[in-house]
Image (spheres, rainbow, N blue to C red):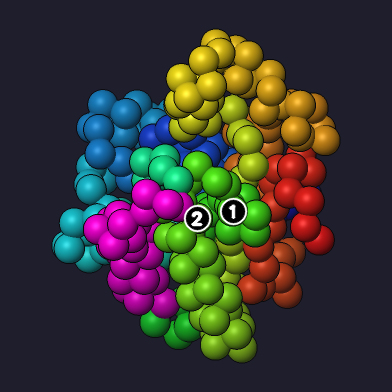
Amino acid sequence: MDLGLTGKVALVLGSTAGLGRATAEALAAEGAHVVVVGRRAELVDALVESLPSATGVVADVTAPDAPALLVNRAREQFGEVDIVVLNGGGPPPGAADAFTAEAAQAAFDLLLKQHISLVGAVLPGMRERGWGRILAIGSSGVRQPIPTLTASNVGRAALAAYLKTLAGTVAGDGVTVNMVLPGRIDTDRVAQLDRAAAERTGVTPEASRTSSEATIPAGRYGDPAEFGAVVAFLASQQAAYLTGEQVRVDGGLVGAY
């Protein structure tokens, strides 16, 4: 299937590793020009070199000037941004009874504040051209809170509420807004969480992973490429009538409808 993404300009946050990298690779494979964003120059450069058409920006997306920096780089290299993929590193684990106002503010800054600013920078052009894709990499915790990830649950749920509200506002302008919710995908972030769980329970990381896999109906962790493929479809021409959705990529992990 031709997804109709040849020549589209995609800005992918946190794209040097994990789900962000898988997304950047999937979009590039469909012919999109990709703007790679990360904090480590060597990782940014390595990914740019591996993609057919890409440019890189070394930036901390929580910095106040980051949205303008990213959008300007995209315009200089390829033109106006057609696809933006919101993505950010997860906040530290923590239980709800230890959650603080300061932790809530940090989660807000990391997972919501700058994403709203970035959307504000690209949305007018998308509406004017009558085509745009706003996508966010979330977490299964948006639908089924994860007890040990309170900050992530709170910050990503707030982003989900904003995006759902936005979707209804811009659908008539040809702009779709969707969130993709990963379950246990085989990334460094999930390996870190497995190690943390192992330390809490006094087992090995391997045993922690095996226990986690047993809770997934598919019986395994997902491959990052499987996740990236779903994001690429949501960015496609064929997905023009799909908006305001939270699409789970979790092997059946979340029990809710």
| Separation (CA) of disc 1 from disc 2 | 6 Å
Q: Position of residue 15 (x, y in %)?
A: 41, 41
- Per the picture, the main secondary structure of the magenta-coloured stretch is helix
In terms of secondary structure, where does tag 2 sit? helix
Does residue 94 show up? yes
Which of disc 2 and disc 1 is earlier in sequence? Answer: 1
Q: Where is residue 206 in the image (x, y as percent from the top left)?
A: 60, 12
Residue 92 drawn in magenta = no
Q: Where is residue 233 in the image (x, y as percent from the top left)?
A: 68, 54
Q: Position of residue 70 (x, y in %)?
A: 27, 57
Residue 104 drawn in magenta = yes
Q: In this view, does 243 lie to the left or right of 27?
A: right
| For the residues bearing labels 1 and 2, Cβ distance under 8 angstroms | yes
Amino acid, disc 1: Pro
Q: Tell me which segment is drawn in magenta.
A: 96-123
Residue lying at the far front in this picture: please name it. 97
Residue at horizontal 35 percent and vertical 76 percent from the top: 120
Q: Is residue 39 left or right of residue 92?
A: left
**Closer to us: 24 or 55:** 24
